[in-house]
Image (cartoon, rainbow, N blue to C red):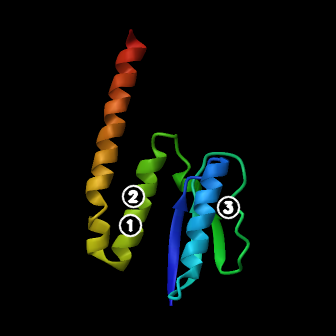
Amino acid sequence: MVSAMVVHQHTNNFGDDVAGSALVLGLLEMPQVDRVDVHYIWQRGGGGLPVTDERVSHTKLNVLAGQRDQRPMLAILAALLAFWRVSPSAGALLLPYLLWVTYAATLNWGFWRIVRAE
C-alpha cells in the first residue's frame, strides 16, 4: 500500500477547502492509497480541510509558515525533498519549477524595491 502526501497552503478560503478536500478524497478512492498525510502551511489562524476520515492525518508545518512570497518556494522545496526520497528522478523534475518560482519572486522583489524607492 501507498501513503500519499499533500502540502496545502490553507488560506481559510472556501475554494481552497473544496479543492483540497476533493484531492484528498480522490486519493483515498485509489485502491493503492491507504493513508493521506495533509501538511498545511500558513502563518496564523486555525482551520484545515474538513476531511474526517481516519486514514487522513493533518499536520501544520510551522517551519514553512513564512511570508506570502516565500510559501510557494518552500512548499515546492518540501515536495522536491519528499519526492527525492522516493525517487531522485521524480525530485529532479521539480528543480526547473523551483528555479522558475525563485526567479519570479526575485524579479517581483526587484520591482517592489524600484516602486518603493520612487
Identified at 26% across, 66% down, the residue is 92
Are the residues flagged by discs 2 and 3 in contact, CB closer than 8 Å? no
Identity of the residue furthest to the bottom in this view: 1
Circle 3 packing at 10 Å, graded few (<14), some (14-19), many (20+), is many
Identified at 37% across, 76% down, the residue is 85
SS at circle 1: helix
For the residues carrying marks 2 and 3, which lies nearer the camera in this image?
A: 3
Are the residues flagged by discs 1 and 2 in contact, CB closer than 8 Å? yes
SS at circle 3: loop
Distance CA(mark 3)–CA(mark 1)? 24 Å
For the residues carrying marks 3 and 1, which lies nearer the camera in this image?
A: 3
**Image coords of residue 110 (percent x, y):** 33, 26
Q: Earlier in the sequence, mark 3 or mark 1?
A: 3
Are the residues flagged by discs 3 and 1 in contact, CB closer than 8 Å? no
Q: Which residue is mark 2?
A: 77
Identified at 51% across, 40% down, the residue is 68
Q: Which residue is mark 1?
A: 81
Q: Which residue is mark 3?
A: 49
